[in-house]
Image (cartoon, rainbow, N blue to C red):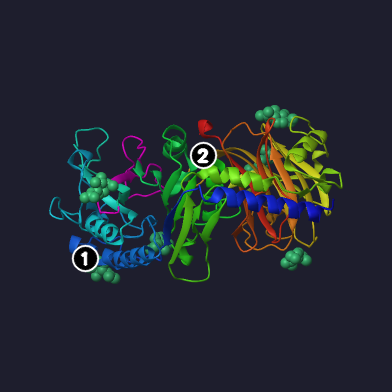
Amino acid sequence: MSPVNLRLIILVFYCCFMARVVHTMKYYMAAVYEHHAVLNHNSTALSSRKLALEFMSKNLNIYEQQVAAAAEKGVQIIVFPEDGIHGFNYSRLSIYPYLDFLPPPHLLPWNPCLEPDKFQDTEVLQRLSCMAASGGMFVVANLGTKVPCDALNPHCPQDGRYQFNTNVVFSDNGTLVASYFKQNLYFEISFDAPPGVQHVAFDTPFGRFGLFTCFDILFYEPVVSLIEKHQVKHLLYPTAWMNQLPLLSSIQIQRAFATGFNVNILAANIHHRTLGMTGSGIFSPLKSSYHYDMDGEGGHLIVARVPVDPSEEMYLGHAKQVSVVNTEMFEGSHTLTSAQVCDKMDNIEHCSDSVGHPKANVFHAEMMYDNFTFTLLTGNKGKIHVCVGTLCCYLSYRRVNVSNELYALGAFDGLHTVHGTYSLQICALVKCGGLDVKTCGQEVTEAGSIVTFQLWGNFSTKYIFPMMVTSGVTLQLPDHWGWKDSCFYMNKMEMDLGLVTAALYGRHYERD
Ligand SMILES: *[C@@H]1O[C@H](CO)[C@@H](O)[C@H](O)[C@H]1NC(C)=O
Ligand SMILES: *[C@@H]1O[C@H](CO)[C@@H](O)[C@H](O)[C@H]1NC(C)=O
Ligand SMILES: *[C@@H]1O[C@H](CO)[C@@H](O)[C@H](O)[C@H]1NC(C)=O
Ligand SMILES: *[C@@H]1O[C@H](CO)[C@@H](O)[C@H](O)[C@H]1NC(C)=O
Ligand SMILES: *[C@@H]1O[C@H](CO)[C@@H](O)[C@H](O)[C@H]1NC(C)=O
Ligand SMILES: *[C@@H]1O[C@H](CO)[C@@H](O)[C@H](O)[C@H]1NC(C)=O
């Protein structure tokens, strides 16, 4: 049977399977809004509450329009980005007039739209609550809040109040149903981290949702804990993320996180080209609806249908993944299924074997401020590996149209210390910035080389995020990924865009 026939048959199988499963699957309609925030260019000056509210209403007016637009599309839950209402660059003192009072849990329930006079300094919460009620949807937004504390308490800041970077959620009738204080602040001098880790989840008719914010995505607490210990399968993720390729572009980490943990993630980013901020999306384990735009200057509403049970889609997806793959790179000319590909892997160099080429062509270059150990891809196909610390990374590759672009396989095993401290284990195939090896690890967004590959490594952490970015900062999923013996692998056998980065991004939380 020719590969083409096989492919056709499998496609037919897949479609039948789809048709059979679809009617039993449940979905909800979600939206995220990438917001081109009106920024406060006077944010370090001391202002009054009145002026602060006038400023913030510029952003809230846009939110209101977007909730109305989402309501017309049947949206049941919408997420707005971090810092979208007040903006950036405040000091602890200058942000104060922009903070709403957040009542403690024992004074709830509260519907700010219906009971506006119950608490003072809650104008922003009132507007968000009214939007949720009038749009008939759950509204998730990020704002600054103040919570008084006893200055004698050692955790309490000296000025007698906490200032929190806060996500709030209003139900479809405007009731405040959840709030979350950002745990992992990213050099935010205007805010305090909460005195204890919060695990915030709430139930809706279409599933249990957890909250986290921006930089939190790189840490165990609270988000991994929410997934592993609190049965959360849907994550709401306001962010204000500055993109940094090759490994940490917004949509790249969002996509990889949903894939790695088999969850849905609703991610809303700020849109500001000059700040390097764009990239929002609605991701289920196998599907993406995303927006990434470094050219335009407007906001963007993304609406998608999301499965209530992400693992159901995963199961469906795996049916699709039992598809034909061209395994010529594994030294056969036959067409094999995924299971056979894995078996075939046993016959070639394996994780535990120290094989291959002398270390002569190994070099070091900085990628994302980390000292990576690299080796180059040469010719139009090959097998290479590179080791550092206890991690060995392996690559089988085929370059379909060899161009004059330089690609390298890099490994890193250690503590990242710039702009945050966190431990990483990474195997990464990257397009270098130019033709000099010194450019490997630089930021690249365009690529012309079609590279199909299998990438694997003997990681000592189980937390691995498979990520793949192609030309123009577009996302791809690998064909297959997972553990095989003591290695984590991913592969991609067909590609129609040039490869920018393919990486197994491992987080070693317990080594932080
Ligand atoms: C900044 O805010 C201060 C205090 O409200 C005000 O006096 C000043 O005129 C503002 N500057 C600009 C450029 O708006
Ligand atoms: C914040 O301040 C930094 C340095 O002071 C400046 O480069 C940046 O443009 C400011 N951002 C905004 C949004 O005003
Ligand atoms: C409003 O929503 C909350 C949270 O979903 C719910 O507990 C409450 O019963 C609702 N109130 C009304 C009047 O429907
Ligand atoms: C990974 O493989 C290398 C080479 O075989 C070995 O030295 C290293 O100990 C392995 N690491 C782990 C965590 O097993
Ligand atoms: C990177 O690591 C290698 C091997 O440990 C070392 O020789 C080299 O000096 C390091 N480079 C930098 C810039 O730290
Ligand atoms: C490789 O193929 C792709 C898709 O056909 C094409 O866009 C790209 O320009 C090609 N690159 C080179 C260097 O020929």
Is residue 12 located in the magenta-colored stretch of the structure? no
Provide the residue designation for mark 2.
422
Which residue is painted at 83% across and 54% down in the image?
380
Q: Is residue 368 visible?
A: no
Looking at the picture, tell me which residue is in the foreground, 279 or 146. Answer: 279
Which residue is painted at 74% across and 33% down in the image?
351
Q: Position of 454 compared to 258: left or right? A: right
Image quadrant of residue 371?
top right
Label 2, label 1: how far apart the Cα atoms are: 40 Å
**Majority SS type along the magenta span:** loop
Mark 2 Cα-neighbour bin, 10 Å: few <14, some 14–19, many ≥20: some
* Residue 166's disc number: none
How many numbered tags mark residues here? Answer: 2
Provide the residue designation for mark 1.
51
| Distance from mark 1 CB to nearest ligand 1 atom below 8 Å | yes
* The residue stretch that appears in magenta: 172-201
Residue 116 x %, y %: 16, 55
Amino acid carrying label 2: it is Tyr
Image quadrant of residue 58?
bottom left
Is residue 173 located in the magenta-colored stretch of the structure? yes
Amino acid carrying label 1: it is Leu
